[in-house]
Image (cartoon, rainbow, N blue to C red):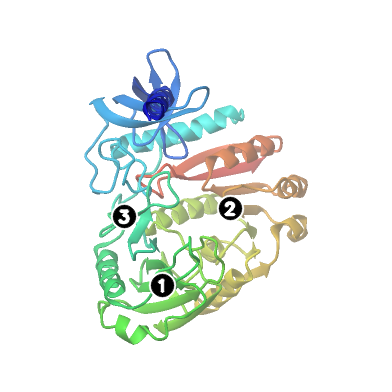
Amino acid sequence: MNSVFLILDFALKFCILIFKFLIMSIIARVMDVTQAGYSKALDMKGVEYIVPFGCPGDTVEVDVKGHGRNKKGIITKIIEPSSDRVEPKCSYAGKDGKVWKKCGGCAFQYISYEKQLKLKRDLIKSAFLKKDVLAEVKEVLLSPQIFGYRNRMDFIVGPNKEIGLREKGSFEKIIDIEKCELVSSRMNEVLASVRKWIKESPVSAWNYASGEGILRYIILREMPGTHELAVIFITYKEYLDNYISDLRKYLPSFVTHIFNGLQDSVADISFGNKYRSYLGGEYLSAKIKDIFYLVSPGSFFQTNSSCAELMLGQVLKWVSEVKPKNVLDLYCGGGFFSLAISKMAGEVCGVELDKSAIDLAIRTAEYNKIKNVKFVSGDVLDFDISFGNYDLLVVDPPRVGLHPKVISRLMEAKIPNLIYVSCNFDSLAYNLSVLGDAYEIEEVQPIDMFPHTPHVETLVKLRRK
């Protein structure tokens, strides 16, 4: 028996020794941030660690896991805070540097807004430098609102009926959020009413582990200009027909639309393949400048309402300088740029792979009585850029940027003017490095569409050499 205890005691001590070897504490200074919303910290020996919720200038204690390159760690103590560190408005943000039970929605809320803008500009400049893109990057245009700016928020429903966002760095853990500072007070009021209904209703929540349950996502959308407010439920295989009459008793009177999207995939998807409307009709509507846009419950629309107007204004300013006759808008979506540009050009052609977005763009053009725009549903890769004798090309591609085939055709078409709208400065830098053989950059204007996150929209005006 004594030998058994000796073996167990040795095994325990060995495990503790291994644990101490794998996790050690070091003192480090936070130097920079990453595009993924983490921070870079250097220890006394110049070794770099990737940590969450560190503000450049912080002196911190870090628990480090593992050895070798690309070390990661968790800030356990802020020894001396940076002069740029501020008290976050949200109780779920990374106030003290620790990651546990902290929402992953806001990566930089504890960094002063002025510093956030500088960090984003530096990230763009660094990406350009790595690809030898020589261009002056203007100061980032600040968002008119840095809280309550989002007109859409997707809240995941957990298996225990928690409603919120995922914990920083985790897919499984959900932070049950009672109030989000990035959305309006009206949206938070709706969130509270939906939370109460879910808790008191027999409706089941989707469980990814067991593959059972119905309710997966609660999506809130508040449309700019019209103030229409929609509650969108994403459910697994079943519509909420049996629950809607009870649900409507809980919702505030200012809710104008209720939709239910059906999603039968077990993958984590926050949109439906089919939508059913229970209130307010088939579409939402938004107004930016003098254009009314029709928006379906699952379609994309610029998330920051006030910055969407800033971005559109910048693009239209560049268009006015070009004075184009024929404009081509690739990756046009629901016609956000095409429809506004049409009032400053002879003819505009928008191309988009998503047929439902094109159908929406056509309806929006008809609603606004715009007749000099045509929309083409098809893959941009297959579209003949050289056919239309265009004098301005506008591109707003997905995060991966322009496909090499598209760039090749673009170079051959010799369109004299190009406006590139990008949500990913890394792919933008790569594309600009290739386009540099034929185009010169005239202006680079970042816009802070996403305060308190590492994301930034970058607009570039180019002219054919």
Which residue is at the front of the view, 371 or 377? 377
Instruction: Point out which mark residue 138 bears.
Output: none
Number of numbered discs on residues: 3
The disc labelled 1 sits on which kind of residue?
Ile
The disc labelled 2 sits on which kind of residue?
Pro
Q: Secondary structure at mark 2?
A: loop
Residue 97 is at least partly visible in this image? yes
The disc labelled 3 sits on which kind of residue?
Leu
Q: Position of residue 240 (x, y in %)?
A: 42, 81
The first of marks 1 and 3 along the sequence is: 3
Q: Which residue is mark 1?
A: 232
Q: Position of residue 151 (x, y in %)?
A: 37, 62
The residue located at (45%, 59%) in the rendering is 302
Q: Quadrant of residue 138?
A: top left
Q: Which residue is mark 2?
A: 398
Q: Report how far apart the C-alphas of labels 2 and 1 lie in the structure.
A: 24 Å
The residue located at (24%, 43%) in the rendering is 88
Q: Position of residue 155 (x, y in %)?
A: 38, 62
Quadrant containing the N terminus in the rendered view: top left
Q: Quadrant of residue 465?
A: top right
Q: Which residue is mark 3?
A: 182
Q: Report how far apart the C-alphas of labels 1 and 3 lie in the structure.
A: 18 Å
Which residue is at the front of the view, 36 or 389? 36
Q: Quadrant of residue 287?
A: bottom left
Q: Is residue 229 above or below residue 164?
A: below
